[in-house]
Image (cartoon, helix red, strand yellow):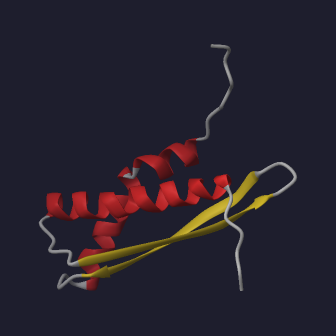
């Protein structure tokens, strides 16, 4: 199956990239050894308005930490990841004259 990629999909990529970065940052802060991370983001858009239908992401971790520790890490990441926080909060975007 071929999936079209649009500029709007960069919103998903930005959220996933932010989460990926923050997994490493928060793991270091919490003292967890993380050997690998994969973040997959998905979602859609109403193509009439380009309003997002929501973003879902999955984090796959390679780490010797326990499942409980990894859950705590991912909770911390979800609470601090800047781009997902900004998307959840909503904003306006406006063109201004130069």
Quarter of the image that includes the C terminus: top right
Q: Nearer the viewer, residue 67 or 15?
A: 15
Q: Extreme top residue here? A: 98
Q: Is residue 46 left or right of residue 24?
A: right
In the rendered view, tell whether residue 11 sits above or below residue 36.
Answer: above
Q: Quadrant of residue 93?
A: top right
Q: How many marks?
A: 0
- Evaluate whether residue 32 shows in this view: yes
Q: Extreme left residue here? A: 31
Q: Nearer the viewer, residue 4 or 54?
A: 4
Residue 3 at x, y percent in the picture: 70, 75
In the rendered view, tell whether residue 81 sits above or below residue 95.
Answer: below
Tell me what residue is drawn at x 29 percent, y 69 percent. 72
Tell me what residue is drawn at x 68 percent, y 26 percent. 94
Residue 85 at x, y percent in the picture: 48, 47
In the rendered view, tell whether residue 35 sits above or below residue 15.
Answer: below
Residue 40 at x, y percent in the picture: 49, 73
Quarter of the image that includes the N terminus: bottom right
Tell me what residue is drawn at x 32 percent, y 59 percent. 21
Q: Is residue 35 left or right of residue 10?
A: left
Q: Is residue 84 left or right of residue 8?
A: left
- Evaluate whether residue 78 shows in this view: no
Q: Quadrant of residue 91?
A: top right
């Amino acid at each position: 199956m071929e999936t079209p990629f649009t500029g709007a999909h960069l919103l998903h990529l930005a959220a996933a990239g932010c989460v990926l970065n923050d997994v490493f940052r928060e793991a270091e802060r919490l003292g967890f050894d993380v050997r690998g991370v994969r973040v997959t983001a998905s979602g859609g858009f109403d193509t009439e308005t380009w309003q997002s239908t929501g973003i879902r992401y999955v984090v796959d971790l390679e780490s010797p930490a326990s499942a409980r520790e990894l859950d705590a890490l991912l909770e911390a990441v979800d609470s601090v990841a800047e781009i997902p926080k900004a998307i959840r909060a909503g904003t306006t975007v406006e063109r201004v004259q130069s």
